[in-house]
Structures are given as C-alpha cells and as structure tokens.
Amino acid sequence: MTAAPRPCPLCEAQASGPAFPYAIRFANQIFRYVRCRDCRTVFVDPVPDAACFAQMYDKANYHDSFYSANDLTPYRQAAALLRQFAPSGSTVLDYGCGVGHFLQAVKAEGFDPYGVEFDAPAAAAAAVHAGCSVVTVADLDRAYAGQLFDVIHLGDVLEHLPDPAATLAGLLARLRPGGLLFVEGPLETNPSPVYWAARFFGGVKHCLKPAEIGCGVPTHLFRTSAPAQSRFFRQRFPDLQPMYWQVSESGWPYAQGNWIKRRVAAAALTLGGRTFAGIQLGNRFKVLYSFSS
C-alpha cells in the first residue's frame, strides 16, 4: 500500500492528487508532485533524505553550476531596497547565502553582513568572496549563540526547505523585536504566460506518456502562488507586519529557451507585476516584514 502524501508544507492541509510536473527521478528515487487541496501549493513527496540533500547541494553540483556567472544587478537592487527600511550598520543575517553575492551587496550598502550555508565548502567560499563571517547550518547555533540580528534575509531559499515554518520560527528567534524579515523567491504556480505554457505542454506530454518519469533534481520542494505565499506568512506568523510586497516576472526558465519560449518569456515580462481581475501576474515575490514580537 502506498503511503499517503505528507501535508502541505505551507498550510498543512492534505494533498488532493498529482500535479504538474508530476514526477522526477533523482538518486535512484522517484519524487512525485502533489497539490494541496486548500492553498493549491504543489509540493514534492517524499522529502529527500539527508543523503539526497548532501548530493543536491554539494558546492560543485549546485553553487558552481547556478551561481558562478550570476548577474549581480538583482542583489544590488535588493540591498538598495533594504537600505530604504534599515539604517546603515544594521546586522544582516543571510540564511542560504549561496556564494555570497547578497552579502557583498549589503556590505557595499553599509550593513554588517553574516551568512549561513548548507554545504561547508560553499560556506568557506562565500566567506572569502564576501569578506565576512559565513557558517554552515550545522554550526549556526554555536557560531551565533545569543546574537540577535537587525535583518534576516532569505533569497531563493524558502522553497528549498523541508519545513519552511519550522525553519522560519527558528530564525525569528534570532531577530530582534522590531527587526526586519526580508524574503525573496519564486512563485512557480502564480499566473504567468510562462507558467501557463509550461503547465499546458507538460500536461499534454503527461497525457500522451503518463508512465514516463524524467530525470531531475527536486531542489524546489514546493511551488506556490502569491496568495498562498502571503497567506503562509499571515497565518503562521501573526507577529510579522508587512511593510513591502512586490510581485514581478523574470521569464525563467523560458528566457533562455528556444525562439518560442523566448517569445512566451517576453510576453510574461511585459505583463509581470500587473493586476487583471484581481489577479497579479508574475513568477517572483519580494517581501519585507517587521517583527513585532
């Protein structure tokens, strides 16, 4: 008998059934995607185990592949936005700091940066790159024991967490009262021409070959929309008061695709951030909350 899927990582409701992108194979395991019956978030089941996580986030496999040639403009824009809400000299903890691009950007804006990374070699490389303290998740409690930060930042991190609510609760214990939580990330099921196209063609392929399971890496453990993401913060963390909320569009991953995909991405970029019939289009969000507890 197949075990029931785990509860939704955002709202804790049960799954209603399979959802795009259906299933992938990684490290000799099959990871299936199911949709929450309440908030409609799509999430991976089961959660990858420790061995899978170590393989997924190995520096050579992940950081060196996805971050080595990054455009630094978004990091600088995020740091400049933060400067509008936090004074110079504020301590900023970047949880899941990658190779240190955001740390470097906030340091240039006059903040006092600290970093956390999953992989030890990645943490060491980020510390050198950004010129600040970067520790692993395993060393977080020891290295920053008793320290409260003015700002905690998660950039493209929340969707990688097996239990985002538990991780955020632990991080908020490190945020001073009146401090800022700054979160950025994807909205992979939010209305967008890229999402509509990907879901349509993925659904057609699944109907034609329902038993086919492609290879991939289940790094994004959930895919959600702007309303569901906002609801997660509002319901699970009532001590957070919204100060800034933005939905935008990157065109990813179609912006680097063939001619047709690039045209779809161009349409998505044109419409990104606009609201139609109460629905805001876009595949990314950026939010700042004040922590009142």
Image (tube, rainbow, N blue to C red):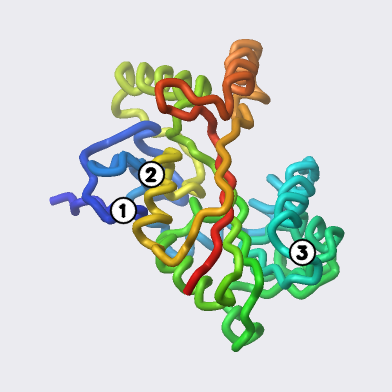
The three-letter amino acid code for the residue at tag 1 is: Cys
Query: In the visual, does 133 lie left or right of 247?
Result: right
**Which quarter of the figure has residue 179?**
bottom right
- Residue nearest the observer in this picture, 60 or 247: 247
Please say if the residues under marks 2 and 3 sit with CB atoms less than 8 Å apart.
no
Please say if the residues under marks 2 and 1 sit with CB atoms less than 8 Å apart.
yes
x 51%, y 49%: residue? 219
Query: In the visual, does 207 lie left or right of 183?
Result: left
The three-letter amino acid code for the residue at tag 2 is: Ala
The Cα atoms of the two marked residues, 2 and 3, are separated by: 32 Å
Relative vertical location of residue 91 with respect to residue 48 in this rendering, above or below: below
Indicate which disc, 2 or 1, sits on the residue closer to the N terminus. Answer: 1
User: Residue beneath label 1, please?
Assistant: 11
In the rendering, which numbered label is found on residue 126?
A: 3
Q: How many C-alpha atoms fall within 10 Å of the one at disc 3: few (<14), some, or many (≥20)?
A: many
| Helix, strand or loop for disc 2 | helix
User: Residue beneath label 2, please?
Assistant: 228
